[in-house]
Amino acid sequence: MDFTLSDNWALHPHSLTKDVDCFMLYPTIYGGRYGMNMPENDESLRSRAVMSLQEMKGVFEESCHVFAPFYRQMAMAGLYLPVKEQEEHLSIALEDVINAFLHYLRNDNQGRPFILAGHSQGAHLLLLLMKALFNDPVLQSLLVAAYIIGYAVTKEDLAECPWLKVASSADDLGRIITYNSQSATAVGSPIHKPGSCCVNPLIWNQSGEYAPRWKNKGSVFVTENGCAGDSIPGFTDAWINEHGALIVDPVDTTELDVGLFPAGVYHRYDYAFFYLNLKENVANRIQAFLT
């Protein structure tokens, strides 16, 4: 894909007035109707991709310029393929992501610090991007934080790439924030992996400490037309179990549609559940970086 073309960016700022950027990747929105990788010029899929970014965008846009490329993501069905086949399809998506990120660095960044933000497959690809490019002191020095949410970052990943480090406080810098939300009884998540690291977004550490729902400043759910609803304080608590999953107990699950995921796997709501806490944390980490 040619990222010199503005049409190949789902989100791109019209003016540069902030101190920090955010390079963002949308989650899996493609079912596989036209093959295992999303076609690059399908307008209906592009519209879905832009819509899927609205929730994430709301967390970051007050603090950052948001740059979000289109990319030829792997279809949802790819999650259930053998690893070798998965890697073949992900490599197509990763090629786009790396090319878009390098274009952003060369043409848009102008030396500003940046955040990486993704969800689901977008988070997976950001992890692969960091593995490929971030053993580089210059990139490390510009990274405020990487919100790799809704995909597993494992202890094995950290051992393989020592430059990857997971956050342990609300304002440590250059670190990864990662978690996967599910109920205490959920089983069979295709996202969670053995040895997963997890940062609790209500207390910003990796301990198993229980974070009561009063620490949740507000969940925000985006409607199908892309509009954010009212914030709901205390919608869920959170704690990390012995397997590195973020366990949540929402006050009301009647309207929570888990889609194609197993019961209690609240993958769709990783950002929504902790929306205002995430938004505040983005601002706090930027403030820590700039000072």
Image (cartoon, rainbow, N blue to C red):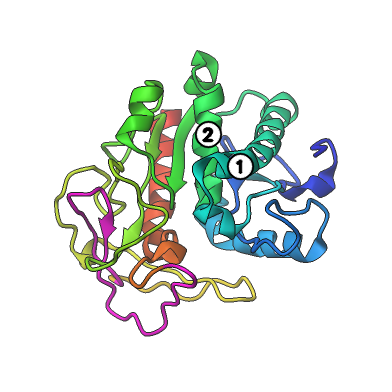
- Number of residues whose C-alpha sits closer than 10 Å to that of mark 1, classed few (under 14), some (14–19) or many (20 or more): many
Q: Relative to 93, is 151 on the left or the right?
A: left
Cα distance between the residues tagged 1 and 2: 10 Å
Amino acid under label 2? Leu
Image quadrant occupied by the N terminus:
top right
Q: Is residue 165 visible?
A: no
Amino acid under label 1? Leu
Residue 277: x and y in percent read: 36, 56
Q: Residue at (69%, 27%) from the top-left corner?
A: 102
Q: Is residue 250 above or below residue 158?
A: below
Q: Relative to 233, is 8 on the left or the right?
A: right
Q: Residue at (56%, 23%) from the top-left corner?
A: 133
Question: SS for tag 2?
Answer: helix
Image quadrant occupied by the C terminus:
top left
By secondary structure, the bulk of the magenta-drawn segment is best described as: loop
Residue 90 badge = 1
Mark 1 and mark 2 residues within 8 Å of each other at the beta carbon: yes
Q: Residue furthest left?
A: 209
Residue placed under numbered mark 2 in the picture: 128
Magenta stretch in the rendered image: 235-261
- Is residue 244 in the magenta section? yes
Say which quarter of the image contains residue 262: bottom left
Q: Is residue 278 above or below residue 256?
A: above
Q: Residue at (59%, 28%) from the top-left corner?
A: 112
